[in-house]
Amino acid sequence: MDLYSVVCVRDRATSQKWFEVFFGRPADEIIGEEYLWQVGENAWVVIDDRRVRAARVGGTMITLGVTDLDDILARLAAHGIEHEPVETYGNGVRHVEVLDPDGNSLSLAEAPAQ
């Protein structure tokens, strides 16, 4: 099974730059007007600014599991991207919410070291 999580945005050019910083690289694929970042073997995050998606701008919520949370947050901070405070859950998972320019939520969750 493949997963394509579509993030509806107002302006693709602005969002493209933001997502390049967030993921630390340019889009892995461009299909028509959609920019795709591969985030797992069969999982993709897609940005789309077509008018048909306008009503959904800002409504996306995605959580990505990561192994290098501090490095990612340092990269984001170096580019002026802010985030909510990092929370540590009772099971040791560290979690933080990052909002894109349209208010879409891309959370990062790091499991404790084994």
Image (cartoon, grey):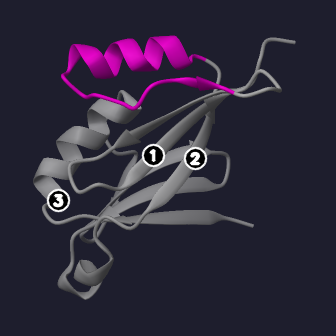
What's the CA distance linking mark 1 and mark 2? 6 Å
Mark 3 surroundings within 10 Å by alpha-carbon count, few (fewer than 14), some (14 through 19), many (20 or more): some
The residue under label 1 is 106
Look at discs 1 and 3 and give the one toward the viewer: 1
Mark 2 surroundings within 10 Å by alpha-carbon count, few (fewer than 14), some (14 through 19), many (20 or more): some
User: CB atoms at circles 1 and 2 under 8 Å apart?
Assistant: no
Check if residue 29 falls in the magenta segment.
Answer: no
Look at discs 3 and 2 and give the one toward the viewer: 2
Extreme residue toward the right, this view: 114
In the picture provided, is 67 more to the left or to the right than 71? right
- Residue at point 80%, 26% (across, down): 90
Residue closer to the observer: 82 or 13: 82
What's the CA distance linking mark 3 and mark 2? 21 Å
The residue under label 2 is 63
Residue closer to the observer: 40 or 60: 60
Q: Residue 105: where, in percent of width, then height?
A: 42, 51
Earlier sequence position, callout 3 versus callout 2 = 3
Earlier sequence position, callout 1 versus callout 2 = 2
The residue under label 3 is 12
Screen quadrant of the N terminus? bottom right
Residue type at tag 1: Leu
Residue type at tag 3: Arg
Q: Residue 11: where, in percent of width, then height?
A: 13, 61
* Secondary element type, mark 1: strand
* Secondary element type, mark 2: strand
Mark 1 surroundings within 10 Å by alpha-carbon count, few (fewer than 14), some (14 through 19), many (20 or more): some
Tell me the magenta residue range: 68-88
What's the CA distance linking mark 1 and mark 3? 17 Å
